[in-house]
Image (spheres, grey):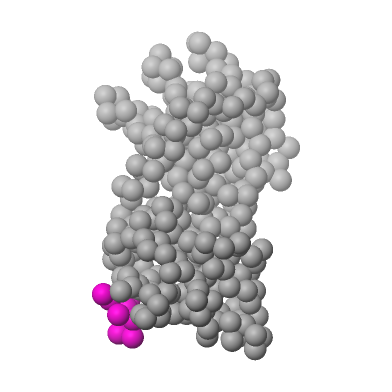
Amino acid sequence: MVEAVLIDLFSLPANLQNNIQGLLFNTLETIEKCSSIPAPFVYVMCCQRQENGESLLPALRDLQSLKKRLQVVRALTTAAVLYTIKQRLDENDLSIIKVILPTLRKDLVKVYIDHLFTAVYQFEFEDLQVASDCKNVQIAEPQSEEQMLPTQDVAVIRSEIQMYLESLPSLNGELTILKSSLIPDDIFLHGFTTRTGGISYIPTLSSCNLFSSSKRRDPQVVVKENLRRLANAAGFNPETFHRVKIDHANAVCIMGKTEPDSYDGIVTNQKGVTIAAPGADCIPVLFADPVRKACGAAHSGRRMVNTTGGYVRLQKMSQLLG
């Protein structure tokens, strides 16, 4: 059952903008006629251009006052609009979305969706056909097969998303890094993050979430931005960042050697790389050997704690490099 409907009018031609209210009313009526179950939420994507954005506001306000279940989301970029709508979907715990959009926009919007959403969400698409006189609106099954956008277009979309996420303010306070006096600063760069300073807004996650999963609502692009902010604050290169697999395993990965299928510990003596282990109810543990200049990170999951062999392997991680 569809939980929300997203209507993409972002690239609405200039000659249709004067009658945007009538266009949306006709579109909503068409949705209600075509849908066996009315969607409880309807979101409309519109472009907020500086030259005509103010002139559209009265019509949009009137429309929203008449259609309480409809929300018009306006922004300068598709990335900003979709991310704002994603936040509202998450607030209402919605995940099954019907997207109604012009055929020419479909492949483009799908790239945005692939980057900004995870497998938690289900999308279905229908074509929006608007007559030039703005009197007839038709919603039809997709006519064309999905096509791949050119590589350069995908790169532009990624850049747009990255720039937008970088512009977002940090949530829940500044990014904080805690350090241990037991690890010498002149040899190892180290620290423990807290829950603040990132841009993740999902209530079940900290704002500085550094782990993405297909089972979560936080997409990889958001986690990547959190990591970028952490790297800037801590002084490491995010491109050489390595994290344990969080498989609750008792194996240790030695960087430079064959990577195990599953492991919750990682150790290295290489310079210029950063290793990490996340922690929530499972405690992250850092190891440092200032003599051999080796370090390790472990996620103390079930098997690490409950298996004696796991303890031994972690306690001797620096010896593995010998």
Name the quadrant containing residue 38. top right
The secondary structure that most of the magenta stretch takes on is: loop
Magenta residue span: 178-186
Q: Residue at x 54, y 68 (%)?
A: 254
Asked if residue 128 can be seen in this view, the reply is no
**On-image quarter of the N terminus:** top right
Residue 187 or residue 50, whichever sits in front: 187
Which residue, as the protein is rendered here, is positioned at the far top?
133
Q: Does 154 lie within the magenta span?
A: no
Looking at the image, residue 68 sits to the left or right of residue 147; the answer is: left
Above or below residue 279? Residue 156 is above
Q: Position of residue 97 (x, y in %)?
A: 62, 42
Looking at the image, residue 209 sits to the left or right of residue 258; the answer is: left
Which residue, as the protein is rendered here, is positioned at the far front?
322
Residue 203 or residue 69, whichever sits in front: 203
Q: Residue at x 68, y 20 (%)?
A: 143
Name the quadrant containing residue 244. bottom right
Q: Position of residue 268 (x, y in %)?
A: 46, 69
Asked if residue 86 can be seen in this view, the reply is yes
Which residue, as the protein is rendered here, is positioned at the far right?
36
Q: Residue at x 39, y 43 (%)?
A: 162
Q: Position of residue 184 (x, y in %)?
A: 30, 80
Looking at the image, residue 141 sits to the left or right of residue 216; the answer is: right
Above or below residue 255? Residue 41 is above
Q: Position of residue 153 (x, y in %)?
A: 46, 27
